[in-house]
Amino acid sequence: MLKRTKYLDDIRPFFDVDLIKVITGIRRSGKSTLLLQIIKELKTKKEIDNNHIIYINFEDVEYSFIKDYLILNKYIKDKIKDNKKYYLFFDEIQNVKSWEKTINSFKATLNTSIFITGSNSDLLSGELATLLSGRYVSFKIYPFTFKEVCELKKVKKEDYDNIFKDYITWGGMPQRFIFEEEKQIRIYLTDIYNSIIMKDIINRFKITDIDLFNRILEYIMTTPSQTFSAENLVKYFNNNDNRNVAKDTIYNYLEYMCRGNLINKVDRYDIRGKRILNGKYKYYLTDLGLGQILNTSKKEQIGAYLENIVYNELIYRGYDVKIGTLENGEIDFICLKDGNKIYIQVAYILTDDKVIEREFNVYNTISDNYPKYVLTMDKFNFSQNGIIHKNIIDWLLEK
């Protein structure tokens, strides 16, 4: 079991803080494992005894009787025997009706430290965010980064390229590394994909036109890192299916996919005008392996996959990421963190002078002194004019 050090470091300062610790992320990204790692730390480093740690996984049939907040309230209070602090862990708590009422009650009336997880962003949306306002701190968990995969598999330097090729194809969902054969991996990822679609999206948002939803989803999942145009999809359905589809419907379905943590929407930012361009987005997959199970006939898009991996890594590292637009082109990522900024261009390989010029010269109209990077699969260092070139694998393995 790989220790998710980065997430533990982020959450550890809040172990005893009087805030609800909310851990979200796509299904099977390792939230339950992270809770168990937190529990282990509490036992070994803080010497908390078992009686003061209560863990419930609401996808375990043993707890299927806890259907609403009143039953949960009674179950927990029956287990609290003294005034010492209790550490409460609720895994996939969205399965309990009106759970937030009991969680707020525990926080207000009991000596507890509360940790909860959920697989969709509704956990903190709308009215619920208001109910928990000022009472929680949230952490989003992602599948394994490439560096974590190398740690898990104890990869030697000479094997990095092969492992990275596998990572591009099948992603970083933690439990897929149990399997060695492609057929097994595909079956496992298909099961996760279907669970997300049915439980976290179609059933939750009561989608009735499932065929339309699936076709839009397939388009997004098999064309990652592309500028999205609802207008083009409307024309496609009209011309090929003689079917009128409203843009609002398309955008609603895309929002549901985001709220199921299947994809992430990234705004486009006009660098010169210093403003967000409404209606202009890119979508990135939370895990490339989930896109691969749909991509049985289309050719590989290595450049797009690399861009997707770099985006996920930037989010993992804590950056706020936007797509940069210029009069003469586009900068793949503008990344902000702790008041600092970096720019990143991503390409497959710098095959000739024309490609080198395209990737480096896009920075010519940016006059600030923030670091500017070009990331590719090339082994040779093409850094020039203050612009830093790095091999993508080397960059992903940095501390």
Image (cartoon, rainbow, N blue to C red):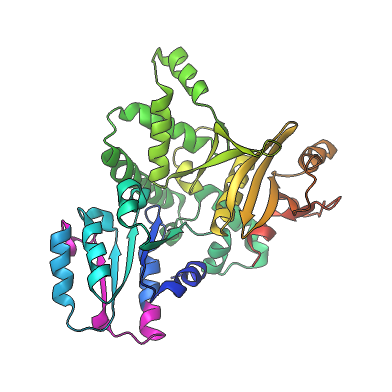
Q: Position of residue 165 (x, y in %)?
A: 60, 51
**Would residue 376 be counted in the magenta stretch?**
no
Which of the 4 image quarters holds residue 65?
bottom left
On the image, which quarter does residue 346 sit in?
A: top right
The answer to whether residue 228 is seen in the rendering is yes
The span picked out in magenta is 40-68
For residue 354, above or below residue 285: above
Which residue does the image show at 49% across and 55% down from the upper left? 172
In this image, 289 relative to 353: left or right? left
Viewer-proximal residue, 92 or 158? 92
Q: Quadrant of residue 202?
A: top left
Residue 152 horizontal side relative to residue 133, left or right: right
Depth check, front residue: 8 or 352: 8
Of the pair 88 and 208, the residue shown nearer to us: 88
Above or below, comparing residue 360 to residue 102 in the picture: above
Q: Quadrant of the C terminus?
A: bottom right
Q: Residue furthest bottom?
A: 47
**Does residue 50 belong to the magenta stretch?**
yes
Q: Report x, y in % for residue 145.
A: 54, 59
In the rendering, at what x and y percent does residue 184 appear? 40, 52
Q: Is residue 301 visible?
A: no
- Please name the residue shown 34% across and 46% down the image: 126
Is residue 373 shown left or right of residue 67?
right
Instruction: Give the mark count.
Output: 0
Which residue does the image show at 27% across and 58% down from the upper left? Answer: 93
Q: In which quadrant will I find the N terminus?
A: bottom left
| Residue 359: image location, x then y, percent | 76, 41
Could you tell whether 392 is left or right of 30 in the image? right
